[in-house]
């Protein structure tokens, strides 16, 4: 295979319908971490917690859903079970669950309440079922995979449409000191069987981890990545241009989809990044912690939703089962800021003109506004259903002397890129694609 053919193949690796739906309909969604840790003030429970301590006396899933919606998020992923093994639903397979919580005299089902609140408010619903279980007596034996699959089946079949199943890679010791060999292949099979429209977060799934929990953006955000990262996804290209091995690669590599990496890969898959982060330092509620600043959360929004990644923002309920007023306030501010900053698309109804630029893989786009306007952001989207191609581009604006000021030089576009520029008054914006793996296919350009 020559280099040109290799590049062309890379430019035509495409998402599945589920991935496309996830990127387009659900770029921003909530995580909710809630379990006995909420009552012990810990991040990881060891599984010996008494279920009686789990008692959310004012549980209000409706409040969660309203707040999540208000912040502009499109769904909720609930920790149905975290590493301590306590189950937030009426499972048949363990007593370490709601059955032994005082909440509703052991008849409570928080997965159900949360799923129903999501439905009522038009949000999607998904769950996190931790494979690492520090309570189960089966952990570390083959029986555990059966136990886990039974629980997974309950969650996949009793709570309506599931948009997302979040598998965690953590694999520590169980109560008998043994580690578990997880049957991820079997888990994924069950999700496909019962919820064929769900996306799966995991190396074996369809959405991959961005590599950090701080909301940090990589150098260039590619959804087309080496197969070695997502071993169960069939590769869409034939394999390496240069013989080598990328077995050492992990999601933390900030140039994961770059040419110098993919040339050695055993084939390429489409696996978009998710950036997960908590609104506070911890995943679980700790009274003495404060939510992150509005600026940090909004910057993370730009680094994720505006950078070819999804944003999975965690909000931990308090022991009484409600969100902390400080978090509610911050979520409200975030939603308002997103709505205000992206209220009016100044480029709407204004055709963008394609100039020839420097050849067909380096076109230029001119966006003419109806009049001179204050411009703060430029948003570009590739027709991601056809693949990700653009490696780099620049944004220029016409100044009062009719000359072009370079505002930003950027890497990758993908499903959506939002570029913040210093507020500029202009009526013409020029976007030059400086490098692309094939002829770019732009789905939209918006200006705010
Ligand atoms: C990690 C877990 O160990 C943390 O407790 C948290 O749930 C985070 C989202 O995933 O792997």
Image (cartoon, rainbow, N blue to C red):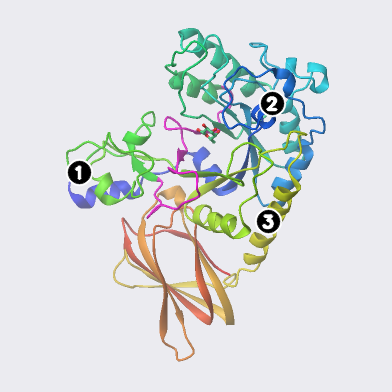
The answer to the question of whether label 1 and label 3 lie on touching residues, with beta carbons closer than 8 A, is no
Residue 57 lies in the magenta-colored region: no
Residue name at image x 50 percent, y 50 percent: 215
Residue name at image x 42 percent, y 58 percent: 441
Q: Disc 3 beta carbon < 8 A from ligand 1?
A: no
Q: Does residue 27 appear to the left or right of 254 in the view shown?
A: right
Crowdedness near tag 3: few (<14), some (14–19) or many (≥20) residues, C-alpha within 10 Å: some
Q: Nearer the viewer, residue 174 or 393?
A: 174
Helix, strand or loop status at disc 2: loop
Image spot of residue 26 (x, y percent): 59, 45
Image spot of residue 264 (x, y percent): 23, 42
Report the number of numbered marks: 3
Residue 207 lies in the magenta-colored region: yes
Sequence-first tag of 1 and 3 = 1
Image height of 100 relative to 226, above or below: above
Name the quadrant containing residue 356: bottom left
| Image: magenta residue range | 194-223
Sequence-first tag of 3 and 2 = 2
Image height of 61 relative to 89, above or below: below
Q: Disc 1 beta carbon < 8 A from ligand 1?
A: no
Crowdedness near tag 1: few (<14), some (14–19) or many (≥20) residues, C-alpha within 10 Å: some
Q: Nearer the viewer, mark 3 or mark 2?
A: 3
Quarter of the figure that contains the C terminus:
bottom right
Quarter of the figure that contains the N terminus:
top left
Q: Nearer the viewer, residue 158 or 102?
A: 102
Label 2, on which residue? 159
CA separation in Å, label 1 and label 3: 45 Å
Name the quadrant containing residue 55: top right
Label 1, on which residue? 241
Label 3, on which residue? 335
What is the magenta segment's predominant secondary structure? loop
């Amino acid at each position: 295979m020559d280099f040109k053919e290799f590049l062309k193949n890379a430019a035509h690796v495409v998402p599945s319908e589920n991935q496309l739906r996830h990127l387009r309909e659900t770029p921003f969604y909530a995580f909710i971490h809630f379990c006995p840790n909420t009552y012990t003030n810990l991040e990881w429970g060891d599984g010996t917690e008494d279920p009686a301590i789990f008692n959310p006396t004012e549980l209000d899933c409706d409040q969660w859903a309203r707040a999540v919606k208000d912040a502009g998020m499109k769904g909720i992923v609930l920790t149905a079970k975290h590493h301590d093994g306590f189950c937030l639903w009426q499972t048949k397979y363990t007593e370490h669950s709601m059955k032994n919580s005082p909440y509703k005299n052991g008849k409570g089902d928080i997965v159900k309440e949360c799923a129903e609140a999501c439905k009522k408010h038009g949000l999607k619903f998904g769950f996190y079922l931790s494979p690492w279980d520090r309570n189960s007596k089966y952990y570390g034996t083959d029986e555990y995979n059966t136990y886990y699959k039974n629980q997974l089946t309950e969650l996949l079949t009793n709570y309506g449409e599931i948009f997302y199943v979040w598998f965690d890679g953590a694999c520590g010791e169980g109560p008998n000191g043994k580690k578990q060999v997880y049957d991820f292949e079997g888990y994924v099979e069950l999700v496909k069987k019962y919820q064929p429209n769900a996306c799966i977060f995991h190396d074996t799934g369809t959405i991959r981890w961005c590599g950090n929990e701080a909301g940090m953006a990589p150098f260039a955000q590619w959804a087309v990545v080496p197969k070695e990262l997502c071993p169960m996804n069939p590769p869409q290209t034939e394999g390496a241009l240069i013989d080598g091995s990328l077995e050492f690669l992990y999601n933390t590599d900030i140039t994961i989809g770059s040419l110098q990496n993919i040339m050695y890969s055993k084939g390429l898959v489409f696996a978009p990044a998710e950036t997960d982060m908590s609104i506070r330092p911890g995943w679980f509620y700790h009274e003495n912690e404060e939510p992150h600043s509005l600026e940090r959360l909004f910057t993370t929004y730009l680094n994720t939703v505006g950078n070819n990644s999804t944003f999975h923002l965690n909000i931990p309920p308090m022991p009484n089962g409600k969100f902390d007023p400080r978090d509610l306030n911050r979520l409200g501010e975030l939603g308002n800021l997103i709505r205000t900053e992206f209220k009016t698309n100044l480029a709407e109804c204004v055709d963008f003109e394609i100039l020839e630029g420097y050849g067909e893989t380096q076109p230029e786009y001119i966006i003419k506004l109806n009049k001179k306007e204050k411009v703060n952001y430029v948003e570009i989207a590739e027709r991601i259903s056809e693949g990700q191609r653009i490696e780099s581009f620049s944004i220029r604006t016409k100044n009062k002397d009719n000359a072009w000021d370079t505002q930003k030089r950027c890497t990758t576009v993908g499903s959506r890129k939002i570029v913040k520029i210093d507020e500029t008054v202009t009526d013409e914006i020029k976007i030059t694609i400086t490098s692309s793996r094939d002829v770019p296919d732009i789905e939209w350009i918006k200006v705010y």
